[in-house]
């Protein structure tokens, strides 16, 4: 073309231009770039005089292009090539981009203010103006992607236009994208400009090497931040990644060229930067970290602001600490791998410790981002617990953390899951570890404040936080916050003012707290009120103060509010307490129209009824009168839906011994059977209903069990009359367990008792539930022979589901529990006889054959051993079964061995022991670990028994003696038992109530809930001496036994220790290497430049062919490798494999970021040949007779490479080998000569990077 043009005269050139221009004008959009290129080349030449008028052809072509640009396809590559053609002629470029700037400015004004379009007489709709504006900015942006030695149009007007569009919704994205492209261009050296005559002198520098004007490095200043200050704060929160990208590029350029930025010395700058760091997504936060780093490089004067301090004399120290800060932010907030977060917490302690240079503005930014609800709970818990520990141990200053306390920390720390998850309950007490730590942390904020005003501010903010939640806070957390405030005040004796006092009164009336929680809240509020400064305020004059103090006095003096004293008022006056008989009670009931038992009078009526029953005796009590009274009470209780005070008062009245005696007397004498049936039915229904209520309200269990037990002891016949067996079965199958909500009440009662001693758990709920378990268990242990049918029926119902199981069974089943087996173990004494012993043995052995859970197996074996103890003649079954079993049932063999060892002491049979020892010899060499281990453990035990009993046929046998010495020398025999299987059990001596329900087997391995203890039975028996006459106490079958030694009780686990629960770091906070996963480099945050085709170009010119591979796991691993190293593409035989679960397990979503294409096996040879035509060299990873060694000589991989991997079994097929350029193999030195295919692929790709990764 150039050769042709030089021979054209001006007329010919003009004619050619007109012809080409007509073609261009006819087609319009999209512009034919080849035609445009010719048209530009045909433009008439222009003299070097910049003041000369341009020929009209330039104006015509400019106007045509400007008309077409808004309608060009929105394709980055097309616009880039269009811009490249436009700047190929300097004069054309100047007038085009000058006009683009003007038109864009006019379009912006029209959109915002509806002013007319810049061309007279033409006012397009706002939508059209907006479209034109966006198209013009896209075109301008494309011109900034051109190489720096191309011509560029950069003026103050362009920069001002772009900055003015920032923050305006319809323009914002395009403005930031164009600014980003411009800043990327400015980051390059020697940017040539086309419009040097329009630029200020300080914007220009002359490049004498290319004889052109270039932009200086100092064209930016504070203009971006002047614009930022005009925008609302909401603009910088949320997803504002483009905002911070522009900011990052701006500051990177300023830092690189030492451009002073005045905004660095303003609080506004650091505040909005912190906002972006706390509220943004990953990319935005990365930009913020980059901005933070660049911002520290620029200042030449110290920064001393609440949000940031910088001593320029110690700039390197500040840079080092903020660099570490960025790393920790990456690990904790961006990566979020729990193990890495856990490992970096010591570094966080050091970084934010006393020697920290990190401003609290930034330390709380990290913590706020980490505790954001969008972060997974595990990470939030790690960081939150670390901060609790940091505050409580005063490991660093928290003076400036007040805003973070209420905005970031308390919303996390008051979550219900944290409080309920850290509840630790035992017989010694119930504690909420997290709640206690929260209270300590809040108190530390008060104690460590510099002034009284600071402490008052903490109290004000915490109380305001509670009220601002408007009840949407986990109620028990309020108590721990108040506890923390009170502890802080007690430590400092701080005085409060009117504002704090008003909030305290409002908090004291918060709803949603249960009874004890409400009383504790009132107590805290009253005690907090006592710190009001009397010189500033007279509390007595404030409405509400008198009420709260009166409530405190009531709590100190009386019983719970719902327990009415005698003489409780009725609507018609006071109850006349003159009823001496049941008939008089019923008369009073009718006279009061049943108001005597309604609402708050119910408890008093029940107490009066109990008093009447105690004094009148059972013989003079008519069932008809009793039925009438109890029926009215039951109807009222049902109407009130059985609240706590009603249930606690109702139960002793319903199951009073007199009521039980009335049932049993009528049952035996047969008098008035209809009334008797009604009374029995009422009491039966009441028993079942109350037992059901214990499921959610375990406090009912103690009063129900103790009352029923007393009634049964006084009238044993009632055991067979009432559905006691069904009630006990319900108890064993569904043991009442306190719910988390109730445990907070228990914890609140403990704390309330500390302030008001008489306000303990018993004052509200009576005895704890374990006293109920003790009463029912003792009743089972004492059932008279005449009522044994109830015990046998219970035993059968408990065993039936265990006996009905079919293999295979799950390890854990919801219907199973330890209490069922404990109850059956207790009942074996009463229920098993010679007639049914074999049946029970079969049932228990069947359950044992199938059972896998060690604790259940232990109790099943004990049950069987007890039956053998009572019927020793049946122990031959053990040896017979042991001889018949093969080693395909190792668990059963191990159980038979243990049963034999359990039975040997009480059988006292040398013959039995000898036969068992003979069986143990081969079993000690069994290939089954469980069998071998049980035989080893049992052999010395039997040998020791033989030595004690002088059984010489065993002790003098040299084989037995040698094996005994060998096993005793093993470490496992001499170490303390660490599992239930290795616990020693004496089936006779250990058979006590205490060992059954509190034995060590409950604490070994996974601890089991201890439902009842030796002390509960002792207390129960002590109460019997005062509540029951001696003859009424039935005989126990199983002795209580001595208490469990404290040395045998389990040690508290670290998780249940309040002192260690929130220690989430090493005791030695020495910084170590911090492992990161995202691995971003701040330099990589700068947007890519150049043609759009290059901006998304993958960095590694390797095509990986894995079509011969079938295994989805290997393909997933190769996907991860290919994406991590930036390969151009991965080819597999079937894209459906990317959806396979095994592929996804190893790909970790890499397939979403990597081109994966389908290439069938049959098409591999043709594809390889086509790659060769495109300049690729094709290399196979395969061991052949001509393979080079990877990385050595001929084994060096080419830069533009196709790597072919073979199948897992057959390698690369001969059809594919035939079209490869060469093969390489990986040198190995071990015996195994082959590697897994994804491992081999990873090594090959890494070798390519080692050779070519750093080369252009």
Image (spheres, grey):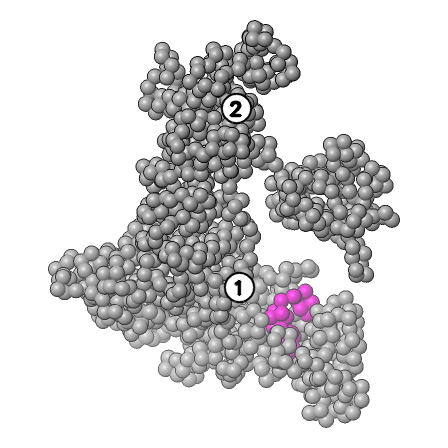
Count of numbered badges drawn on the protein = 2
Residue 476 vs residue 490, the one in the foreground: 490
Going 76% across and 44% down the picture, which residue do you hit?
A: 1205
Q: Is residue 283 visible?
A: yes
Q: Which residue is mark 1?
A: 1072
Secondary structure mainly formed by the magenta segment = helix
Coordinates of residue 228 in the picture (x, y in percent): 35, 39
Q: What residue sits 67% from the left and 78% below the top?
A: 972
Q: Are marks 2 and 1 in contact (CB under 8 Å)?
A: no
Q: Which residue is mark 2?
A: 87
Quarter containing the C terminus: top right
Foreground pick, 1243 / 1239 = 1243
Crowd around label 1: few <14 · some 14–19 · many ≥20 (10 Å): few
Measured as percent of width and height from the top left, residue 648 is found at 35, 66
Disc 2 versus disc 1: distance between alpha carbons?
A: 54 Å
Up-down: is 673 above or below 41?
below
- The span picked out in magenta is 845-870
Is 444 magenta? The answer is: no
State the SS at label 1.
Answer: loop
Residue 721 at least partly seen: no
As displayed, is residue 973 above or below residue 821? below
Check the image and report above or below for 743 versus 7: below
The residue closer to the viewer here, 262 or 811, is 262
Determine whether, in the image, residue 1008 is placed left or right of residue 743: right
Residue 207 percent coordinates (x, y): 50, 33
Question: From the viewer's perspective, is the residue at label 2 or at label 1 nearer?
Answer: 2
Furthest toward the front, the residue is: 208
Residue shown at the point (51%, 27%) measured from the top left: 151
């Amino acid at each position: 073309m150039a050769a042709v043009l030089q021979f054209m005269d001006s007329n010919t050139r003009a004619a050619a231009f007109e012809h080409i221009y007509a073609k261009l004008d006819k087609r319009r959009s999209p512009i034919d770039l080849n035609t445009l290129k010719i048209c530009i080349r045909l433009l008439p030449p222009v003299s070097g005089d910049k003041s000369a008028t341009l020929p009209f052809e330039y104006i015509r072509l400019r106007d045509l292009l400007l008309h077409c640009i808004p309608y060009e396809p929105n394709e980055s590559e097309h616009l880039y090539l269009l811009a490249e053609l436009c700047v190929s002629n300097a004069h054309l470029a100047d007038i085009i981009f000058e006009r683009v700037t003007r038109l864009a400015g006019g379009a912006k004004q029209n959109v915002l203010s509806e002013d007319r379009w810049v061309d007279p007489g033409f006012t397009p709709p706002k939508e059209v103006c907006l479209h034109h504006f966006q198209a013009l900015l896209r075109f301008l942006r494309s011109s900034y992607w051109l190489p720096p030695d191309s011509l560029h149009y950069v003026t103050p007007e362009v920069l001002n236009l772009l900055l003015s569009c920032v923050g305006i919704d319809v323009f914002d994205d395009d403005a930031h994208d164009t600014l980003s492209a411009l800043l990327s261009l400015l980051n390059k050296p020697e940017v040539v400009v086309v419009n040097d005559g329009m630029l200020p002198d300080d914007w220009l520098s002359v490049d004498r090497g290319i004889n052109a004007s270039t932009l200086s490095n100092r064209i930016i200043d504070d203009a971006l931040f002047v614009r930022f200050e005009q925008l609302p704060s909401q603009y910088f929160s949320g997803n504002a990644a483009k905002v911070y990208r522009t900011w990052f590029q701006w500051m990177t350029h300023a830092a690189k060229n030492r451009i002073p930025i005045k905004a660095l010395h303003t609080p506004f700058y650091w505040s909005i930067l912190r906002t972006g760091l706390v509220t943004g997504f990953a990319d935005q936060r990365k930009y913020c970290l980059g901005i933070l780093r660049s911002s520290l490089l620029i200042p030449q004067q110290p920064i001393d602001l609440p949000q940031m301090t910088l001593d320029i004399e110690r700039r390197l120290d500040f840079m080092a600490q903020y660099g570490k800060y960025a790393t920790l932010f990456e690990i904790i907030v961006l990566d979020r791998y729990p193990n890495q977060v856990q490992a970096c917490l010591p570094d966080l302690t050091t970084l934010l410790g006393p020697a920290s240079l990190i401003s609290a503005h930034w330390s709380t930014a990290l913590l706020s981002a980490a505790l954001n609800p969008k972060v997974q709970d595990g990470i939030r818990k790690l960081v939150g617990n670390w901060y609790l520990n940091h505050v409580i141990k005063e490991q660093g200053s928290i003076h400036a953390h007040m805003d973070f306390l209420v905005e970031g920390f308390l919303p996390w720390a008051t979550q219900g899951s944290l409080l309920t998850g850290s509840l630790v309950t035992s017989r010694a007490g119930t504690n909420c570890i997290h709640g206690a730590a929260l209270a300590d942390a809040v108190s530390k904020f008060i104690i460590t404040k510099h002034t009284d005003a600071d402490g008052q501010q903490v109290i004000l903010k915490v109380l305001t936080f509670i009220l601002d939640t408007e009840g949407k806070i986990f109620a028990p957390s309020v108590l721990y916050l108040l506890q923390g405030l009170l502890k802080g005040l007690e430590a400092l004796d701080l005085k409060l003012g009117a504002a704090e006092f008003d909030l305290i009164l409002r908090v004291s009336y918060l709803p949603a707290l249960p009874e004890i929680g409400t009383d504790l809240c009132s107590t805290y509020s009253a005690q907090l009120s006592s710190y009001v400064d009397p010189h500033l305020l007279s509390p007595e004059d404030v409405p509400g103060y008198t009420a709260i103090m009166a409530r405190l006095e009531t709590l100190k003096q009386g019983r719970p509010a719902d327990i009415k004293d005698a003489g409780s008022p009725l609507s018609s006056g006071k109850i006349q307490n003159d009823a001496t008989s049941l008939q008089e009670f019923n008369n009073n009931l009718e006279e009061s129209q049943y108001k005597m038992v309604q609402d708050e009078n119910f408890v008093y009526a029940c107490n009066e009824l109990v008093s009447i029953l105690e004094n009148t005796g059972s013989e003079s009590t008519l069932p008809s009168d009793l039925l009438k009274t109890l029926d009215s009470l039951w109807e009222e209780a049902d109407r009130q839906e059985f609240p706590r005070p009603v249930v606690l008062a109702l139960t002793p009245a319903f199951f009073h011994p007199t009521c039980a005696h009335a049932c049993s007397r009528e049952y035996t004498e047969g008098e008035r059977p209809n009334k008797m049936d009604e009374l029995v039915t009422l009491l039966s229904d009441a028993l079942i209903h109350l037992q059901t209520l214990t499921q959610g309200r375990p406090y009912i269990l103690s009063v129900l069990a103790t009352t029923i037990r007393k009634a049964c002891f006084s009238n044993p016949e009632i055991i067979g009359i009432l559905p006691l067996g069904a009630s006990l079965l319900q108890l064993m199958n569904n043991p009442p367990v306190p719910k988390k909500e109730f445990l907070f009440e228990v914890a609140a009662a403990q704390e309330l008792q500390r302030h008001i001693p008489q306000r303990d758990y018993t004052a509200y709920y009576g005895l704890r539930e374990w006293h109920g378990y003790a009463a029912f268990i003792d009743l089972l242990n004492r059932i008279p022979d005449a009522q044994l049918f109830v015990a046998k029926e219970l035993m059968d119902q408990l065993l039936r589901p265990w006996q009905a199981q079919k293999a295979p069974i799950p390890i854990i089943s919801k219907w199973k529990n330890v209490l069922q087996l404990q109850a059956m173990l207790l009942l074996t004494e009463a229920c098993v006889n010679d007639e049914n012993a074999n049946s029970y043995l079969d049932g228990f052995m069947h359950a044992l054959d199938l059972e896998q859970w060690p604790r259940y197996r232990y109790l099943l074996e004990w049950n069987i051993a007890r039956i053998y103890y009572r019927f020793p003649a049946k122990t031959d079954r053990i040896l017979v079964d042991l001889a018949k079993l093969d080693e395909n049932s190792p668990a059963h063999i191990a159980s038979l061995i243990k049963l034999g060892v359990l039975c040997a002491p009480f059988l006292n049979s040398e013959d039995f022991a000898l036969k068992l020892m003979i069986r143990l010899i081969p079993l000690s060499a069994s290939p089954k670990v469980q069998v071998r281990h049980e035989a080893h453990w049992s052999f010395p035990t039997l040998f020791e028994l033989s030595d004690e009993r002088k059984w010489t046929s065993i002790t003098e046998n040299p084989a037995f003696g040698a094996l005994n010495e060998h096993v005793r020398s093993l470490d496992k025999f001499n170490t303390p038992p660490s599992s239930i299987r290795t616990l020693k059990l004496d089936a006779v001596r250990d058979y006590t109530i205490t060992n059954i329900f509190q034995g060590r087997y409950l604490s070994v391995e996974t601890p089991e809930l201890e439902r009842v203890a030796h002390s509960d039975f002792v207390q129960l028996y002590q109460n019997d001496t005062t509540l029951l006459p001696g003859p009424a106490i039935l005989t126990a079958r199983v002795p209580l036994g001595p208490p469990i030694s404290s040395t045998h009780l389990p040690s508290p686990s670290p998780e249940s220790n309040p002192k260690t629960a929130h220690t989430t770091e090493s005791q030695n906070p020495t910084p170590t290497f911090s492992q990161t996963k995202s691995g971003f480099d701040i330099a990589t945050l700068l947007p890519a430049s150049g043609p759009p085709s290059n901006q998304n170009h993958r960095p590694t010119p390797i095509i990986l062919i894995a079509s011969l591979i079938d295994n989805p796991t290997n393909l997933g691993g190769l996907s991860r490798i290919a994406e991590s190293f930036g390969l151009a593409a991965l080819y597999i035989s079937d894209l459906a494999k990317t959806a396979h679960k095994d592929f996804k397990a190893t790909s970790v979503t890499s397939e979403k970021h990597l081109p994966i294409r389908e290439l069938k096996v049959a098409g591999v040879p043709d594809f390889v040949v086509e790659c060769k035509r495109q300049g690729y060299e094709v290399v196979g990873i395969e061991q052949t007779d001509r393979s080079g060694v990877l990385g050595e000589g001929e084994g060096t991989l080419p830069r533009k490479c196709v790597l072919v991997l073979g199948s897992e079994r057959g390698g690369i097929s001969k059809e594919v080998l035939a079209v490869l350029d060469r093969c390489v193999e990986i040198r190995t030195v071990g015996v195994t000569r082959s590697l897994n295919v994804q491992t081999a692929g990873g090594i090959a790709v890494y070798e390519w990077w080692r050779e070519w990764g750093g080369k252009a």
